[in-house]
């Protein structure tokens, strides 16, 4: 029989810390998704209002091009926000794992 003192405190604290980081990342992701949804809803509502004022096929084409550019710029900005969050969360987790390993 092996008689060893096993310290479960450090592994438990490590798991707790990592789960806290995961929870924070998920919470931030949900908040970003909520903001993105609200931004898209607002965008489409505004664009629908603009579309009702179009008078000619030329106006429609110009509106369509400008609207698509604005939509893609909005989506790009939202994607960058998610990328930034993913990078930040990954860096925090790796820093914590490195602390555990030392």
Image: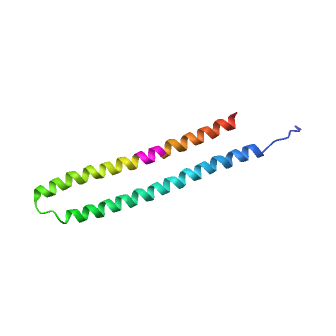
Picture quarter with the N terminus: top right
Q: Nearer the viewer, residue 98 or 49?
A: 49
Residue 69 position within the rendered picture, expressed as x and y whole percent measured from the top left: 26, 49
Residue 71 position within the rendered picture, expressed as x and y whole percent measured from the top left: 30, 52
Residue shown at 89%/39% (left/top)? 3
Specify how the rendered protein is coloured: rainbow
What is the magenta range?
80-84
Residue shown at 49%/56% (left/top)? 30
* Residue 42: quadrant of the picture: bottom left
Up/down of 22 relative to 44, above or below: above
Residue 82 position within the rendered picture, expressed as x and y whole percent measured from the top left: 45, 48
- The stretch drawn in magenta includes residue 99: no
Up/down of 5 relative to 75, above or below: above
Q: Is residue 54 left or right of residue 81?
A: left
Q: Is residue 102 left or right of residue 79?
A: right
Residue shown at 63%/50% (left/top)? 19
Residue shown at 59%/38% (left/top)? 94
**Magenta highlight: main SS:** helix
Residue 58 position within the rendered picture, expressed as x and y whole percent measured from the top left: 11, 55
* Residue 83: quadrant of the picture: top left
């Amino acid at each position: 029989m092996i008689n060893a003192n096993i310290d479960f405190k450090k592994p438990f604290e490590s798991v707790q810390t990592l789960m806290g980081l995961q929870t924070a990342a998920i919470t931030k992701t949900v908040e970003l998704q909520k903001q993105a949804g609200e931004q898209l809803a607002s965008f489409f509502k505004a664009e629908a209002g603009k579309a009702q004022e179009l008078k000619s096929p030329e106006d429609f084409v110009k509106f369509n091009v400008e609207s698509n550019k604005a939509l893609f710029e909005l989506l790009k900005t939202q994607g960058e926000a998610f990328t930034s969050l993913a990078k930040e969360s990954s860096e925090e987790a790796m820093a914590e794992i490195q602390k555990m390993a030392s």
